Image: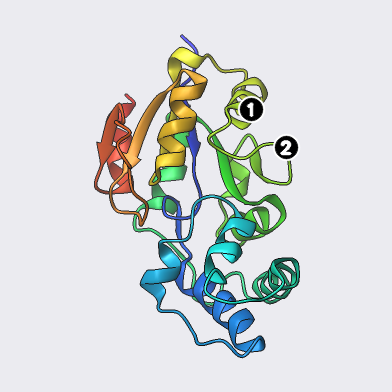
């Protein structure tokens, strides 16, 4: 039997990046003379890529979205891991899954370049077959192209593949790709009516899915 493949979302699944994302958004907003937004508000904007995050964060103002996006990107790229942390059990769990023969990849709507820097910082990259983020392929989740690419690179089968994430985009991409899904209830996303194959309350529960 092929080794199972776990395809992980990044923000809200492997890492809690809300504070750094919020700081970057507020740095951008104050550069335009706008008020800062609370973390809870910015958290609700996350999940559909960096540009969509910025668009939502300036929807209350008359500013150039392209300029806002560039200002946000410049600041965030130099402040990727100031407050960002892995969720409890992630680093140990990734290693344990690898020791059990599992294959792993990351599929995120976060830009690929910053995603790889963060994964390198936390020592997770060596365990991954690939990291596919925004800009690496032509379409973001829920388009299934990224999932299919992960499956191809891992030489895995769709029947033994799980998409693990905290957001409806993760559940939707799993549905579109014809693979199983695991919803991370500990993250900051929402299901929006999509139904996962399974749900977990902590990352360590993933070990229950493998022998």
Does residue 63 appear anywhere in the picture? yes
Does residue 102 appear anywhere in the picture? no
In this rendered view, identify the residue nearer to me: 44 or 206: 44
Q: Residue at x 27, y 31 (%)?
A: 198
Task: Tell me, yes or no, whether the two marked residues, 1 and 2, touch with CB atoms within 8 Å.
Answer: yes
Report x, y in % for residue 100.
42, 29
Report x, y in % for residue 55.
59, 63
Report x, y in % for residue 21.
53, 70
The image shows residue 46, relative to residue 1, as above or below, that is below
The image shows residue 206, relative to residue 39, as above or below, that is above
Per the image, label 2 sits on a secondary structure element best described as: loop
Disc 1: CA contacts within 10 A as few (<14), some (14-19) or many (>=20): some
Residue carrying label 1: 145
Mark closer to the chain start, 1 or 2: 2
Colouring method of the image: rainbow
In this rendered view, identify the residue nearer to me: 76 or 52: 52
Report x, y in % for residue 140.
62, 40
Q: Residue at x 41, y 51 (%)?
A: 90
In this rendered view, identify the residue nearer to me: 118 or 22: 22
As drawn, the residue found furthest toward the bottom would be: 33
Q: Which mark is residue 137?
A: 2
Q: Which mark is residue 43?
A: none
* Relative to 14, 23 lies left or right: right
Q: Residue at x 61, y 48 (%)?
A: 125
As drawn, the residue found furthest toward the top would be: 1
**Number of residue marks:** 2
């Amino acid at each position: 039997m092929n080794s199972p493949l776990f395809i992980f979302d990044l923000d809200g699944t492997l890492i809690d990046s809300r504070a750094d994302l919020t700081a970057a958004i507020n740095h951008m907003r104050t550069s335009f003379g706008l008020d800062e937004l609370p973390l809870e508000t910015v958290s609700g904007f996350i999940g559909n890529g960096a540009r969509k995050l910025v668009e939502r964060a300036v929807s209350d103002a008359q500013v150039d979205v392209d300029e806002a996006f560039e200002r946000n990107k410049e600041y965030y790229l130099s402040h990727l891991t100031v407050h960002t942390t892995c969720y409890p059990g992630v680093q140990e769990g990734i290693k344990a899954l690898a020791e059990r023969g599992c294959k792993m990849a990351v599929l995120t709507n976060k830009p690929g370049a910053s995603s790889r820097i963060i994964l390198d910082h936390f020592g997770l990259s060596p365990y991954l077959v690939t990291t596919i983020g925004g800009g690496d392929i032509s379409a973001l989740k829920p388009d299934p192209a990224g999932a299919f690419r992960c499956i191809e690179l891992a030489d895995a089968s769709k029947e033994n593949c799980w998409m693990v994430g905290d957001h409806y985009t993760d559940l939707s991409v799993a549905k579109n790709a014809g693979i199983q899904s695991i919803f991370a209830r500990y993250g900051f996303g929402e299901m929006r009516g999509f139904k996962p194959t399974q749900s977990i309350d902590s990352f360590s529960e993933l070990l229950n899915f493998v022998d």
